[in-house]
Image (cartoon, rainbow, N blue to C red):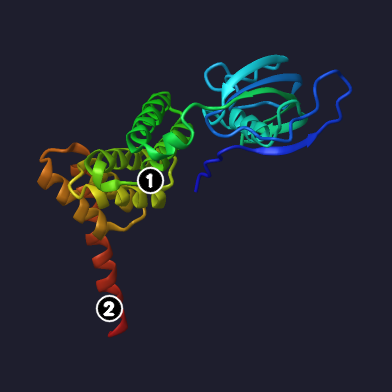
Amino acid sequence: MNRIPVCEVIDQRPLADNDETPPPSSVFRPLIGDECSVALTDVWLQAPLTDCGPSTSKWFDGTDRALVFVLGEADCVVDRGLEAVVAGMRPGELREFCVGDGRGGRVNGRVRLSAVRKAAGGAGWRGDDRLKLTEAARHKDVGNRLYGQGRFADAFHRFNRAARAVLFVRNVDAVRDDRDAMYAVVCNNMAACQLRLGNYEHARQLSGKALAVEPSNVKALVRRCQASAELRMFDGALVDAVRALNIEPGNAVAERYRDVAARGVDAQNARYGDMVKKMFA
C-alpha cells in the first residue's frame, strides 16, 4: 500500500528568546481557519525535498522569509508539516523544527509565530449546514486542480477535507439532496486518487461509500469494479461492470473490466474444478 502522509514532523522544540519580542501568550493557539503570520529563519535543506518545489511547496525555497497563511490550507507534505508545528505554538513563541516530505527529504529551520487573526464565523459556521457544503465544494475544487496536476496524494487530502465538512452537517434532512450529491462526488474522487496510488482496497471501500448514497452512480460502480478486479475479486467486479453497463451502455472502462472480470471468473472456476477432481480422483 502507498501510504499517504498528511505531514511529517521529525522534530520540534521551543527556544529561549533573548530579543525584545513580547513573551508568548498563554491565552490561545491557532485553530484551523485562523490567519497566521510567521517568520522563517535559519532555513536549510538537510536532504533534497522531492515534495518541495515551485509547483508544490509555497513556503520553502531555501531562504528566510515572512509568511502569512491560513492554517489548514497547505497543499503539500512539507507545508502541512510547518502547519502542524505552528498549530502547537502561541503568539510570540519561537521554535526550531525539522519537517520532511514523507520520502526522505528534510528541511530544518526556526519559526516564530508573530500574530494570529481568528477566523470569521466561529460557532455560527459550525451551525450553518449550507456554509459547510460551500466549504466542501471549495475543498473539492482545489482537489480537482491538484488531481489535474498529477498530485494525487495532495488531492486526496483536499477531498478528505471536503468529506469531513459534509459529515459535520447536522440537519441532514434539510439538505439531504445536496449533502448526498457532494458526499458521493468526494468519495468518488478519493477513490480515483487511491486507484492512481495503487491502494485498491481503499478505493473499493470509498466507491462503496459513494454507492451507499447513490446506488446508480456509474463512476462509483466502475471504480469499485476496477479496484475489485485488481484485488482479484472477480465476482464482485463482474457484477459492478454489468450494473454500470446497464445504466450507461458503451462505457469503455466498464466494458474493459467486464471482460477482465469474466476471464478471471472463468479461470477461478476452472482452477476450482481441477481442485475438486483431484480431491475425488
Q: Are marks 1 and 2 in contact (CB under 8 Å)?
A: no
Quadrant placement of the C terminus: bottom left
Label located before the other in sequence (1 or 2): 1
Furthest residue to the bottom? 280
Task: Specify whether residue 10 is in view.
Answer: yes
- Secondary structure beneath dot 2 equals helix
- For label 1, the residue is 167
Given the image, on which type of amino acid does mark 1 rest?
Leu
State the image coordinates of residue 238 (x, y, percent, origin top left): 21, 54
In the picture shown, does residue 146 fall above or below 231? Answer: above
Depth check, front residue: 21 or 204? 21
The CA distance from mark 1 to mark 2 is: 48 Å
Q: Residue at x 16, y 38 (%)?
A: 251
Task: Specify whether residue 230 is in view.
Answer: no
Crowding near the residue tagged with mark 2, few <14, some 14–19, many ≥20 C-alpha atoms within 10 Å: few
State the image coordinates of residue 88 (x, y, percent, origin top left): 68, 37
Depth check, front residue: 181 or 25? 25
State the image coordinates of residue 177 (x, y, percent, origin top left): 22, 41
Depth check, front residue: 142 or 148? 142
In the picture shown, does residue 201 fall above or below 10? Answer: below
Given the image, on which type of amino acid does mark 2 rest?
Val
Judge from the rendering whether residue 83 lies leftward or rightward of residue 134; answer left or right.
Answer: right
Judge from the rendering whether residue 43 lies leftward or rightward of residue 118; answer left or right.
Answer: right
In the picture shown, does residue 165 fall above or below 111? Answer: below
Query: Total of numbered circles in the picture?
Result: 2
- For label 2, the residue is 276
